[in-house]
Amino acid sequence: MAAACNSFYLTAWILLCLHFFTFSSITPQAEARAFFVFGDSLVDNGNNNYLVTSARADSPPYGIDYPTRRPTGRFSNGFNIPDLIGEQMGLEPTLPYLSQILNGENLLAGANFASAGVGILNDTGIQFLNIIRIWMQFNYFQQYQSRVSGLVGAEQTQRLVNEALVLISLGGNDFVNNYYLVPYSARSRQFSLPDFVNYLIVEYRKILLNLYDLGARRVLVTGTGPMGCVPAELAQRSRDGECAVELQRAAALYNPQLTAMLSSLNSDLGADVFIAANTFEMHMNFISDPQTYGFITSKIACCGQGPYNGFGLCTPISNLCPNRDVYAFWDAFHPTERANRIIVQQIFTGSNKFMNPMNLSTVMALDSRT
């Protein structure tokens, strides 16, 4: 009788432990900081693999330095900026929202909604046919929240979203794949460059307010890089390897206005919701002085063809450099993983010249106290 009684209590204790561990396996993840990513090819980690589009990075040699040595949909030889931010913060890797394995507890780590080719404007990237425009990325974000509510409830979902880190990268395609895509584009006939920049800023403000309404409370907003200095623009517009003047002028007009708009938004909201990452200056450091950063060139892409390896796509038959760590650009538009690491280091520790009103390390320290 005593043995039976002891067996009963032992069984009950095991069941209680199993219940506890099953419950706790979901609760800590729900309380951890999630990470959400929106935007374009600089931050897309594979959503376009699931679309019928020409804006894809799903064939070699993309991914040549990724742990699997296989293409992932990232426009990189390895990791991209969201990967490296998550790595430094100790976050679970975010999966593309369209991935079939983004379900169950994986959802609690966040999601990447970005899609190569998109811009602030809906007519940006129309040549790529099927891409996830920013309004659709937000629709998916709402769908995501409904799915998570089914796991942890509406209140816990709202908390997860409010406490998450959000990264958004938009704007570059509105210039290189819209305004300057062809001579006398529809947008360049409609707007002078200063007026076009003003229009983008007004439209981007609406996008960011929409993101706030969807629950985002800590948002890193990247500016455009030095668009006139990427190998694609050097190949098309540069005679002597100098950065293309008109695209550099566009970046010089756009980026300060973006930072000012974010400061104004924060003032209106009464909190430092939006953090401006001056990726233009971050890039210019190693573009202007590549040797100081260990690069042999900031003009020639590692993978490509034509002048500066700046024509066409990176494909299995393209020129390919043997050592990606000594090239600032991987393909005609996108930095190498090592260049991305330099950018991410500035995001974490950079001064107000690079991060306004504060860098990500300061954000993390402030958030850990609340």
Image (spheres, rainbow, N blue to C red):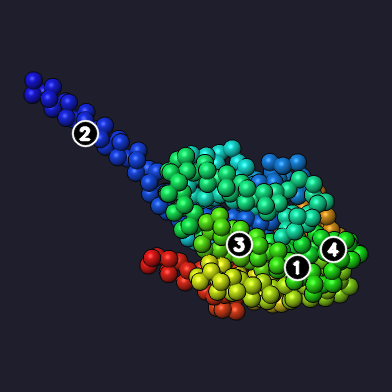
Label 4 – label 1 distance at C-alpha: 11 Å
SS of the residue under disc 2:
helix
Quick one: 260 or 77, which is closer to the camera? 260
Q: Which mark is residue 187?
A: 4
Residue in the image at 68% along x and 61% along y: 170
Residue type beneath disc 4: Arg
Residue in the image at 47% along x and 71% along y: 362
Residue type beneath disc 1: Tyr
Q: Mark 3 points at which residue?
A: 209
Label 2 – label 3 distance at C-alpha: 51 Å
- Find out whether the residues at labels 4 and 2 contact each other: C-beta distance under 8 Å: no
Q: Nearer the observer, disc 1 or disc 2?
A: 1
Residue type beneath disc 2: Trp
Residue 268: x %, y % from top left: 56, 71
251 sits to left or right of 341: right
Q: Mark 2 points at which residue?
A: 13
- Which is nearer the N-term, disc 3 or disc 4? 4
Q: Which mark is residue 199?
A: 1
- Find out whether the residues at labels 1 and 2 contact each other: C-beta distance under 8 Å: no
Residue in the image at 79% along x and 55% along y: 123
251 sits to left or right of 94: right
SS of the residue under disc 4:
helix
